[in-house]
């Protein structure tokens, strides 16, 4: 089992989860984060830190989001320190269907 970043992270990217992760498994896209399933040790400390509740165990997540985390963790740069959230994160925190509407496949700057 591993943890998965959900579509609630899109256009928010608060990054509180990055600060508590003991194994550096987060990767940064332009407007969301993903978790590398090969690096995640299933400790779960990231889940309660997400202010938009966008992290869950893979056993509770649809396959599309598991695959998105797997794929983009290989394409996007590692992030090991909390950076700046999206500038309009608070405006998008409660929106639904963000993956289809706002997801960007472009990498973020990373800091790993």
Image (cartoon, grey):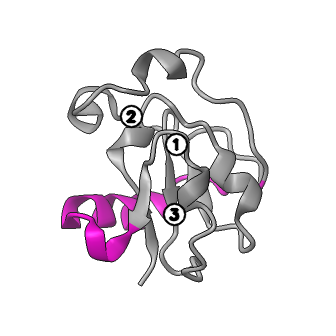
Range of magenta residues: 57-80
In the structure shown, which secondary structural element does the residue marked by tag 3 occupy?
Answer: strand
Left or right of residue 80, residue 59 in this image: left
Left or right of residue 98, residue 62 in this image: left
Residue at 29% from the left image edge and 58% from the top image edge: 65
In the structure shown, which secondary structural element does the residue marked by tag 1 occupy?
Answer: loop
Whether residues under marks 1 and 2 lie with C-beta atoms below 8 angstroms apart, the answer is: yes
Question: Which residue has dot 1 on it?
Answer: 29
Which quarter of the rendered picture does the C terminus lie within? bottom right
For residue 64: magenta? yes
List x then y, in percent, for residue 96.
25, 31
Q: Which mark is residue 104?
A: 2
> Which badge, 1 or 2, is on the more N-terminal residue?
1
Q: Is residue 105 visible?
A: no
Q: Is 108 rendered above or below residue 33?
A: above
Could you tell me how far apart the alpha carbons at marks 3 and 2 are, in whole angstroms? 16 Å
In which image quadrant can residue 85 be found?
top right
In which image quadrant can residue 101 be found?
top left
Question: Which residue has dot 3 on it?
Answer: 35
List x then y, in percent, for residue 78.
66, 57
């Amino acid at each position: 089992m591993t943890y998965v970043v959900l579509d609630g992270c899109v256009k928010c990217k608060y990054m509180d989860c990055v600060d508590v992760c003991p194994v550096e498994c987060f990767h940064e896209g332009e407007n969301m984060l993903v978790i590398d399933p090969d690096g995640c040790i299933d400790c779960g400390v990231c889940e309660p830190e997400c202010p938009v509740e966008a992290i869950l165990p893979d056993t509770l997540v649809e396959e599309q989001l598991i695959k998105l985390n797997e794929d983009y963790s290989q394409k996007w740069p590692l992030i090991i320190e909390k950076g700046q959230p999206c500038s309009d994160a608070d405006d998008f925190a409660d929106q639904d269907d963000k993956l289809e509407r706002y997801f960007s496949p472009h990498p973020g700057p990373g800091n790993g």
